[in-house]
Image (spheres, rainbow, N blue to C red):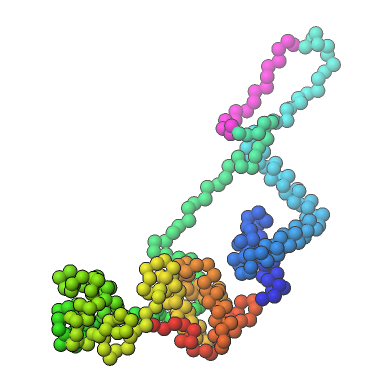
């Protein structure tokens, strides 16, 4: 990614945000970075350059436009004063005073009655001198937006507009149930049956200590310290065999290869498992799509599932797909991806 490409994306994103918000102070470089997708330091420098260039452009407005804006602001201020009806009013000068001496003037002049006006409640924090603030002007009340019951979320609408639908998730591979052939002929068939059910339910090999803990108390042979010896004796003669390394599994069957994040019960391991499942769907969708697409389209297709994985997860996956050898994707700036024809099974992990 060249500096020129990043500058063009930053300037374009900042222009869009300025048009949407109408002010420099209503958005920052973080929002620009989310749209431009660049390094934080580079985006910050380019964003400051953009602000300087747009401020200079704003000062170069023609005089006729400035005069029209000044006239418009004056008319708005006059209407606000008339609507609020507060502040000092210009007094009626009345007829010009005659040159009659003060001795012939009446001692009492009745005051001119003022038209009745509704009393308005003034704010305690209003500025002195009758000045009116814009925040004190009455505003029309807006009706609350109507929300349809059972309506679709914004991400679901974007996913539909993108025209991309992810392939269905992989069918979950359930372990085969235990059968009589697994424990038949054992020295202790009751113990062998319980061990076989634990192994089939787990779907992978297990150690003697884990088997001892999972057995019902009435079937546990001896103590946990001697579980390896006692279980091995009890299942002797059945299909269950002890393997080198302290594992128990069925004789003649391939040992399943378990994944670390499937055996750990932590937040990070569960997130990795969700990420692998979603990437499998994305990779197969790209292979079946057979047309160029953008990152924004694929994000919309993923919908709410991306919120469970961390910011930038899809971007990193797409970068790895185009940088691997052989590449899975081809990238054309600024944001066009194309499938190279490599099978999705080469880049997405299978169970």
Residue 80 percent coordinates (x, y): 66, 41
Magenta segment: does it hold 109?
Answer: yes
The magenta stretch is: 106-124
Out of 44 and 325, give the one closest to the viewer.
325
Can the viewer see residue 197? no
Q: Across the whole image, how many numbered discs are drawn on residues?
A: 0
Out of 279 and 140, give the one closest to the viewer.
279
Out of 28 and 80, give the one closest to the viewer.
28
Q: In the rendered view, would you say 96 is above or below 309?
A: above
Q: In this view, does 267 lie to the left or right of 86?
A: left
In the rendered image, the residue lying farthest to the right is: 99
Q: In this view, does 222 lie to the left or right of 337?
A: left
Residue 350 percent coordinates (x, y): 41, 83
Q: In the rendered view, would you say 114 is above or below 319?
A: above
Q: Quadrant where the N terminus lies?
A: bottom right
Q: In the rendered view, would you say 340 is above or below 38?
A: below
In the rendered image, the residue lying farthest to the bottom is: 252
Q: In this view, does 75 lie to the left or right of 219?
A: right
Q: Residue at x 49, y 51 (%)?
A: 143
Residue 178 percent coordinates (x, y): 22, 82
Q: Residue at x 50, y 78 (%)?
A: 163
Magenta segment: does it hold 150?
Answer: no
Q: In which quarter of the image is residue 126?
A: top right
Q: Quadrant where the C terminus lies?
A: bottom left
Q: In which quarter of the image is residue 192?
A: bottom left
Helix, strand or loop: magenta stretch: loop
Q: In which quarter of the image is residue 208?
A: bottom left
Q: Which residue is drawn at 71% across and 15% down?
A: 109
Can the viewer see residue 66? yes
Out of 311 and 114, give the one closest to the viewer.
311
Residue 120 percent coordinates (x, y): 57, 32
């Amino acid at each position: 990614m060249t500096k020129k490409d990043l500058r063009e994306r930053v300037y374009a994103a900042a222009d869009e945000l300025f048009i949407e918000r109408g002010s420099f102070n209503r958005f920052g470089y973080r929002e620009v970075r989310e749209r431009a997708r660049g390094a934080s330091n580079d985006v910050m420098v380019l964003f400051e350059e953009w602000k300087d260039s747009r401020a200079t452009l704003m000062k170069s407005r023609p005089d006729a436009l400035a005069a029209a804006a000044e006239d418009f602001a004056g008319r708005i201020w006059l209407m606000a004063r008339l609507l609020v009806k507060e502040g000092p009013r210009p007094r009626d000068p009345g007829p010009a005073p005659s040159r009659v001496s003060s001795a012939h003037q009446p001692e009492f002049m009745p005051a001119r009655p003022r038209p009745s006006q509704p009393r308005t409640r003034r704010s305690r924090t209003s500025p002195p001198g009758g000045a009116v603030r814009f925040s004190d002007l009455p505003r029309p009340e807006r009706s609350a937006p109507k929300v349809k019951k059972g309506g679709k979320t914004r991400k679901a609408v974007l996913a539909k507009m993108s025209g991309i639908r992810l392939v269905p998730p992989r069918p979950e591979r359930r372990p085969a149930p235990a059968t009589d052939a697994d424990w038949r002929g054992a020295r202790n068939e009751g113990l062998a049956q319980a061990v076989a059910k634990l192994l089939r339910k787990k779907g992978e090999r297990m150690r003697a200590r884990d088997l001892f803990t999972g057995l019902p108390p009435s079937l546990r042979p001896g103590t946990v310290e001697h579980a390896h010896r006692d279980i091995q004796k009890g299942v002797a003669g059945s299909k269950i065999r002890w393997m080198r390394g302290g594992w128990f599994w069925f004789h003649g069957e391939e040992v399943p290869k378990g994944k670390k994040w499937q055996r750990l019960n932590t937040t990070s391991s569960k997130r990795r498992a969700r990420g692998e499942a979603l990437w499998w769907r994305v990779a197969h969708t790209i292979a079946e799509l057979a047309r160029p697409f953008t990152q924004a389209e694929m994000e919309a297709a993923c919908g709410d599932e991306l919120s469970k994985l961390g910011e930038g997860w899809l971007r990193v996956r797409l970068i790895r797909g185009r940088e691997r050898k052989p590449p899975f994707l081809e990238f054309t700036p600024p944001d066009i991806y194309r499938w190279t024809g490599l099978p999705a099974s080469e880049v997405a992990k299978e169970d």
